[in-house]
Image (cartoon, helix red, strand yellow):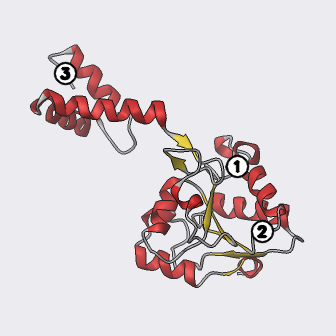
């Protein structure tokens, strides 16, 4: 791809680093921005600058938040006895869109993947276990994507808390094995939360 401007080329190269964005799509987006009034671009860059400067991680669930405790954790109408364990913020958003879960979340920040160099120490598993040991949680719901890495992570956490007085369940496998949770439709995902099964039972299937 030949560029008539080094500034244009640099902008396209940066935008193309985003997931799912190739050089042609990046060029189309950059040219679109160039056609807009200058303040439109300023709004975008300001929003991104503010995001990087001011975004926080909830101290309780590790969800992305504007303040120290996210809106879900401080909501008095949420049932604090139920804790849904997810991979990242996208899964929280996906489950929330179903309106089928009224408990709290714990965001791991990824899945155990030796191939990618991600071990238990790279995730928020330790804080999850400490949270469980407080004894206020009645049920943990594993809601990780049904992939090999997701199953490995579920099993690792299960072994860490096995024997504690807590119910451990996992979302029903209405979601196809190998699919990422965020891409499941709302109805399927909502039903998988409502029809969750004991985690021990999922080990035998």
In the foreground, 191 or 56: 56
Q: Quadrant of residue 12?
A: top left
User: Which label's residue is closer to the chain start, 2 or 3?
Assistant: 3
Query: Relative to residue 159, is residue 117 drawn left or right?
Result: left
Rendered position, 182 above or below 174: above
Residue 80, image x and y in percent?
Answer: 66, 69
Pick whichever of labels 1 and 2 is earlier in the sequence: 1
Q: Residue furthest bottom?
A: 195
Around disc 2, counting alpha carbons within 10 Å, would you say few (fewer than 14), some (14 to 19), or many (20 or more)? few
Q: Residue at 23% of width from left, 16% of height from top?
A: 7
Q: Position of residue 148 (x, y in %)?
A: 64, 61
Residue 34: image x %, image y %? Answer: 14, 29
197 or 36, which is in the foreground?
36
Closer to the camera: disc 1 or disc 2? 2
The label nearer to you, 3 versus 1, is 1
Mark 1 — residue?
A: 124
Q: Is residue 92 above or below residue 67?
A: below
As helix, strand or loop, the secondary structure at mark 1 comes to loop
Residue 31 placed where, x, y %? 15, 32
> What is the CA distance from the residue labelled 1 to the residue labelled 2?
19 Å
Q: Which residue in the protein does label 3 denote? A: 2
Q: Residues within 10 Å of mark 1 (few under 14, many from 20)?
A: some
* 56 w.r.t. 202: above or below: above
Give the quadrant of the N terminus. top left
Answer with left or right where residue 135 lies relative to residue 77: right
Which residue is nearer to you in this view: 181 or 94?
A: 94
Near mark 3 (Cα within 10 A), the count class, few <14, some 14-19 or many ≥20, is few
Dot placed on the residue nearer the N-terminal end, 3 or 1: 3
Q: Secondary structure at mark 2?
A: loop
Q: Which mark is residue 108?
A: none
**Which residue was labeled with disc 2?**
136
Q: Residue furthest right?
A: 163
């Amino acid at each position: 791809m030949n560029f008539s401007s080094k500034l244009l080329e640099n902008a396209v190269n940066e935008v193309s680093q985003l997931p799912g964005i190739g050089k042609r799509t990046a060029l189309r987006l950059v040219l679109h921005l160039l056609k807009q009034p200058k303040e439109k671009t300023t709004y975008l860059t300001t929003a991104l600058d503010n995001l990087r400067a001011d975004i926080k991680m909830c101290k309780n669930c590790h969800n992305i938040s504007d303040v120290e405790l996210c809106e879900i954790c401080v909501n008095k109408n949420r049932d604090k006895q139920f804790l849904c364990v997810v991979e990242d913020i996208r899964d929280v958003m996906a489950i929330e869109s179903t309106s089928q879960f009224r408990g709290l979340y714990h965001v791991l920040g990824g899945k155990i993947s030796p191939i990618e160099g991600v071990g238990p120490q790279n995730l928020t598993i330790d804080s999850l276990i400490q949270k469980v040991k407080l004894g206020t949680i009645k049920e943990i719901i594993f809601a990780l994507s049904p992939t090999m890495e997701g199953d490995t992570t579920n099993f690792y956490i299960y072994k860490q808390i096995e024997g504690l007085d807590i119910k451990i369940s996992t979302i029903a496998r209405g979601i196809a094995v190998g699919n990422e949770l965020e891409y499941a439709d709302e109805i399927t995902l909502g039903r998988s939360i409502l029809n969750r099964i004991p985690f021990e039972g999922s080990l035998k299937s």
